[in-house]
């Protein structure tokens, strides 16, 4: 299984994710090495199993042939034994090329045994028919003992092959447990990646919430700033009106002073009507002194209001400067937070891509492992069933031969 490497992130914006990417790459390399080693071990085990199967089939064939011959020799009558041995030896002498196949030429030393058995059977037949004494009956027993030893050796090899088969099954079980262990490791890695993605998504949600709150606070500050501008505009209008009133009062005072000088110069020669006509600036004030006192009181009040307004304006200006500073700081913070949010979004996209790749690799590993397990299990089961069926056939043939004899 080949793991695809993800693209390296931009060094200027994604330096914080390099360590995590290196860890992910190391884990992927370790998993790849383990899978390659497991594949190599499986191939070597398959070769060894095939070799053992070939040896097992050869030994089974040899055991079958020897068991058949031994049963025929033990259970057959004397005449049948002699006829069988004569047929075998004559066929070997007449057509030796027929017995040069790989199945029957495994052990060429068996021919000497057959010749010795033939000679012993021939002597036994002569002894039974003509009453000739046996020269060396111990050789017959020795031949039987050698055959029995040979059969025992083959049965021992058969048992050894069965032990090897048991070892192979245990190795298969160990390999299956190892595959389950690696599957658990892959699932644990997947769960860790999912937890990391969930934490990053939660951080993204928190940062978005903070960004919206900062934007709302900025809008509120902007509204306050606009309201203060509106108040400042009203204050400037009031100050302009106050300055106009002061200017008109100064003009009236100058006019009144000029009128009084003229009256003093004329020494009140005209009447009240002439005085009123000579003082056009403030006739009402001259006519009614109470209204003049009221104007002075209102002017003092307006001056007090102007002073209070000036103080309020200074305080408002100070507050506006402070708020401008706060707005500038909040804008800088919002800019930095927006940059962080963009970098985190890009990191989340990269991690999601890597997670998708890792998930695909995990799924492929699981599929390959399940296919391998199923194939190996079917293979081993079929081999075990075939071996059992062969052993059952051998036993059935032996029982049939024994029943026939």
Image (tube, rainbow, N blue to C red):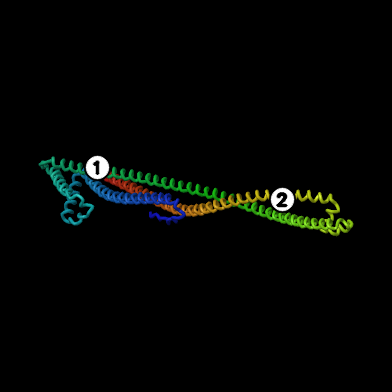
> Which residue is the site of mark 1?
156
Residue 336 appears in the rendering:
yes
Expressed as whole percent of the image width and height from the top left, the position of residue 224 reads 65, 51
Q: Quadrant of the C terminus?
A: top left
Expressed as whole percent of the image width and height from the top left, the position of residue 321 reads 61, 51
Query: N-terminal of the two: label 1 or label 2?
Result: 1
Q: Quadrant of the N terminus?
A: bottom left
Asked whether, in this view, residue 322 is left or right of residue 28, the answer is: right
Mark pair 1, 2: CA separation: 124 Å
**Label of residue 79 in the image:** none
Q: Secondary structure at mark 1?
A: helix
On screen, residue 246 above or below 72: below
Q: Say which of 402 and 337 sits in front.
A: 337
On screen, residue 270 above or below 290: below
* Label 1 vs label 2, nearer the camera: 2
Report how many numbered discs are placed on residues in the image: 2
Asked whether, in this view, residue 350 is left or right of residue 294, the answer is: left
Q: Say which of 230 and 21 sits in front.
A: 230
> Which residue is the site of mark 2?
306
């Amino acid at each position: 299984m080949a793991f695809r490497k993800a693209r390296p992130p931009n060094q200027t914006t994604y330096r914080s994710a390099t360590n995590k990417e290196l860890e992910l790459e190391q884990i992927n390399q370790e998993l790849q090495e383990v899978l390659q080693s497991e594949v190599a071990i499986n191939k070597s085990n398959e070769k060894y199993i095939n070799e053992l199967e070939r040896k097992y089939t050869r030994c089974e064939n040899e055991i079958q042939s020897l068991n058949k011959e031994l049963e025929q020799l033990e259970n057959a009558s004397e005449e049948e034994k002699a006829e069988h041995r004569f047929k075998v030896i004559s066929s070997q002498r007449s057509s030796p090329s027929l017995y040069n196949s790989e199945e029957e030429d495994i052990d060429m030393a068996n021919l000497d045994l057959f010749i010795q058995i033939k000679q012993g059977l021939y002597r036994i037949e002569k002894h039974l028919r003509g009453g000739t004494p046996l020269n060396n009956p111990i050789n017959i027993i020795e031949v039987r003992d050698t055959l029995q030893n040979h059969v025992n050796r083959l049965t021992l090899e058969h048992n050894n092959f069965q032990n090897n088969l048991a070892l192979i099954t245990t190795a298969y079980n160990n390999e299956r447990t190892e595959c389950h262990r690696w599957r658990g490791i892959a699932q644990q890695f997947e769960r860790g990646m999912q937890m990391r993605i969930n934490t990053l998504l939660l951080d993204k949600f928190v940062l978005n919430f903070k960004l919206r709150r900062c934007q709302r606070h900025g809008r509120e500050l902007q509204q306050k700033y606009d309201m203060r501008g509106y108040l400042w505009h009203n204050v400037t209008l009031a100050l302009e009106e106050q300055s106009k009133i002061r200017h008109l009062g100064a003009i009236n005072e100058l006019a009144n002073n000029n009128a009084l000088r003229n009256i003093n110069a004329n020494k009140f020669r005209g009447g009240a009507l002439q005085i009123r006509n000579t003082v056009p600036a403030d006739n009402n004030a001259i006519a009614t002194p109470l209204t003049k006192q009221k104007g002075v009181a209102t002017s003092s009040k307006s001056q007090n209001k102007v002073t209070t307004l000036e103080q309020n304006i200074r305080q408002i200006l100070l507050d506006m400067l402070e708020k401008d500073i706060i707005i500038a700081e909040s804008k800088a913070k919002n800019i930095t937070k927006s940059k962080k949010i963009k970098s985190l979004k890009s990191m989340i996209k990269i991690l999601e891509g890597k997670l998708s790749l890792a998930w695909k690799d995990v799924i492929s590993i699981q599929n390959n492992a399940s296919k391998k397990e199923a194939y190996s299990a079917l293979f081993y089961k079929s081999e075990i069933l075939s071996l059992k069926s062969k052993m059952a056939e051998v036993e059935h043939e032996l029982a049939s031969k024994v029943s026939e004899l």
